[in-house]
Amino acid sequence: MSLTAYMDDLGRAARAAATQMAAASTAAKNTALLALARRLREAGPSLAEANARDLAGAAELSGPLRDRLKLDAKTLATVAEGCEQIAAMPDPVGEITGVKRRPTGISVGQMRVPLGVFGMIYESRPNVTIEAASLAIKSGNACILRGGSEAIHSNLALAEIVSASLEEAGLPRAAVQLVNTTDRAAVGLLISSPQWVDVIIPRGGKGLIERISAEAKVPVIKHLDGNCHSYVDEQVDLAQAVKVVDNAKTQKYSPCNATESLLVHAAQAKAFLPLIAEVFTAKGVEMRGCGRTCALLPAAVPATEEDWSTEYLAPIISIKVVDSLDEAIAHINRYGSHHTDAILTTNHPNAMRFLREVDSASVMVNASTRFADGFEYGLGAEIGISTDKFHARGPVGLEGLTSMKWVVLGQGEVRG
Amino acid sequence: MSLTAYMDDLGRAARAAATQMAAASTAAKNTALLALARRLREAGPSLAEANARDLAGAAELSGPLRDRLKLDAKTLATVAEGCEQIAAMPDPVGEITGVKRRPTGISVGQMRVPLGVFGMIYESRPNVTIEAASLAIKSGNACILRGGSEAIHSNLALAEIVSASLEEAGLPRAAVQLVNTTDRAAVGLLISSPQWVDVIIPRGGKGLIERISAEAKVPVIKHLDGNCHSYVDEQVDLAQAVKVVDNAKTQKYSPCNATESLLVHAAQAKAFLPLIAEVFTAKGVEMRGCGRTCALLPAAVPATEEDWSTEYLAPIISIKVVDSLDEAIAHINRYGSHHTDAILTTNHPNAMRFLREVDSASVMVNASTRFADGFEYGLGAEIGISTDKFHARGPVGLEGLTSMKWVVLGQGEVRG
């Protein structure tokens, strides 16, 4: 069979499964999720064998990359627990909101329904296969998954476990399908088939996501970089600001919600910068500052224009002294990546202006940017983080995989 | 100046204006809208002259098309009233919803904010210029408008009136800009500039919208065809069903929410079809039926496979007898255009299944499909109707021009 025919088969089966999943009862979906959790915990030699094949094929990969591939009992227990948590969450499908009586007599409201079919393209970690599958099941969507080539055997074995769990609950096996070839052309077909796929969710490096966004013929929930800012305002609790900025930068360097750039109001620069510099120096964080920062901090090196736009994901921070809240907001909107930005302030009007005027998916007052996360926000699960404004923004949970359709309840009304 | 440089100038000015509009007060936005209403009512010779030039250039157009171009006092009074209605509506921007305390101590909620810049591409009627401008102003967005070449002089004069109204309210003139050239390449640039435009809203024929959707590099709120169904269920109030189906088909033939296809449960076919056929025959509506329909209705002609997918926008209706609700739902999901579909029934479980399982932007029980409209739904205004599932679905009002960002309110919390 040609690749096009194969992908069309997957698409056709996904569409048919999506119709059944949209109508599936909450009980059936939860049964499938709990069956999946059980089957993952009991996973026998066929999964271990498949994973061993991937690991053998990945001999040339570095230690951390190989670790991410590994499906040991602990990893399986964690993803199984995730499935149970999703089963315990409320079903987003079928919620009817805002029903209002209109002067004509009809009642108009909105009903939450699944999007239909989503495609997910991801690299390396095979546990993403289960995360995507469990979110698809609970949200009543079907999905077509395309994992990394280095994890193909593990992913195929996991997809078989998912399909068996769906079948056990009386749901269509094809609600979750994995592309069974590592041919790169499959990605091109998946992202240009609006007849089969309603939205594409890529998870991976910026290069992958930019390429997919540029070429896709269907909507993309895309997560580009996280160049997050913490801004220390003119009126501030200094000790609190040091604690929060420290956490935002150093609690973990690699996540997209770590602060990469620190802005400090000129009135606080002399008091605040030496305090935070002491923390950063002790933790080995390189400071790249504007002229005024460098004048105050001997340990800082001069920042270049490029530093203001850079997501380091490393123990490096750029630091700029600003003269006003306006300058801080303008800087963030110009150089930031519209991901997550925080103000540290005791001034209420400034807090409200920051929330309103900073054009980012998450805006925070007196909290660490590291909180920008689906679990921390109470979404229960996260299919991705969107740096776009259209449809879902920021952490995307089950609701991001649904849409609201209009419902009209009448008693025989006609239009005059 | 090259066209690219010109469009970049528009884009840059729109981005700058969007930032100011997002922060604009409700009072300033309403002042601009009321000034716009006043200026439209008082519009002097320069607008009349511009409109006369367009009408003179459109001498070869048919009567109805020329009528749509005409900006007389009555048309201007209507659009001015529209501006006043939008001024009276609540401001969607700044609404904060769902704020919940999390176990970590932070409070997390969502704030409604403008999308940024929208581009609108439309044909013929110059009053769309004012509708788009007034929705942009109220929703705190900037917009770049590209009207039809036959209305270019009227549109430029209207855009000048809009900019003067914005200026009067202390808002940026560039919040609403009109492309001042009829060069078709401008459309291509507009729809492929994500750096300047957040969403494109095309209004026009299916061909225009398909072309734009295929080529756009930014999200499109697209409205394709409206192949709407009315389904008469097994248990039904026959007199009510006749009244509603009559209205859905014949109240007006040209709107996208008119019913184009009638499905009738076999158990009601013998009773219902002759009743509705009498109405249709009296009104000159051509009936194209399946075999069972034609056997019951001598006036019907046989329908072809193509009829089931056709949006007639004319006094023609396709009619099919089905054996079950399942068959009706499957038929609608297969042949419909996911716009608006209605069930006529007295059976509650069937009504709920229809609402849930028909995959359309509007689903109705015992009401005419003609109600699918932003004004009838209480949106106050309508920028378009979306047949997509992503972001906004069905009639799109002010809320469809906004997005929800996350707000986090802390007291110095850090992530552990």
Image (cartoon, coloured by chain):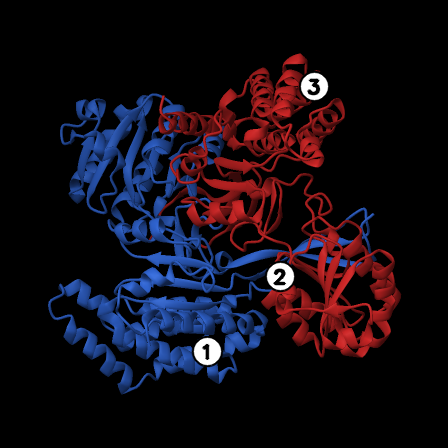
Chain colours: A red, B blue
- At horizontal 34% and vertical 21% (from top left) the residue drawn is B323
Give the amino acid type for the residue marked by disc 3 in the picture: Arg
How far apart marks 1 and 2 lie (CA) works out to: 23 Å
On residue B95, the disc is: 2
On residue A38, the disc is: 3
Give the amino acid type for the residue marked by disc 2 in the picture: Glu
Residue farthest toward the front in the current orientation of the protein: A60
Above or below residue A283? Residue B345 is above
- Name the residue tied to disc 1: B34
Using the image as rendered, state which of residue A9 and residue B262 is in the foreground: A9
Quarter of the figure with residue B80: bottom left
Q: Is residue A202 left or right of residue B340?
A: right
Residue B312 screen position, x and y as percent:
22, 43
- At horizontal 31% and vertical 44% (from top left) the residue drawn is B248
Give the amino acid type for the residue marked by disc 1 in the picture: Leu
1 and 2 marks on the same chain: yes
Q: Earlier in the sequence, mark 1 or mark 2?
A: 1
Q: Give neighbour class at mark 1: few <14, some 14-19, many 20+ (Cα, 10 Å).
A: many
Q: Give neighbour class at mark 3: few <14, some 14-19, many 20+ (Cα, 10 Å).
A: some
Q: Which of marks 1 and 2 is in front?
A: 2
Q: Is mark 3 on a helix, strand or loop?
A: helix
- At horizontal 66% and vertical 75% (from top left) the residue drawn is A327
On residue B97, the disc is: none
Q: What element carries label 1?
A: helix
Q: In this view, does A109 lie to the left or right of B243?
A: right
3 and 1 marks on the same chain: no
Residue farthest toward the bottom in the current orientation of the protein: B45
Residue A326 screen position, x and y as percent:
66, 76
Quarter of the figure with residue A68: top right
Q: Is mark 2 on a helix, strand or loop?
A: loop
Quarter of the figure with residue A193: top left
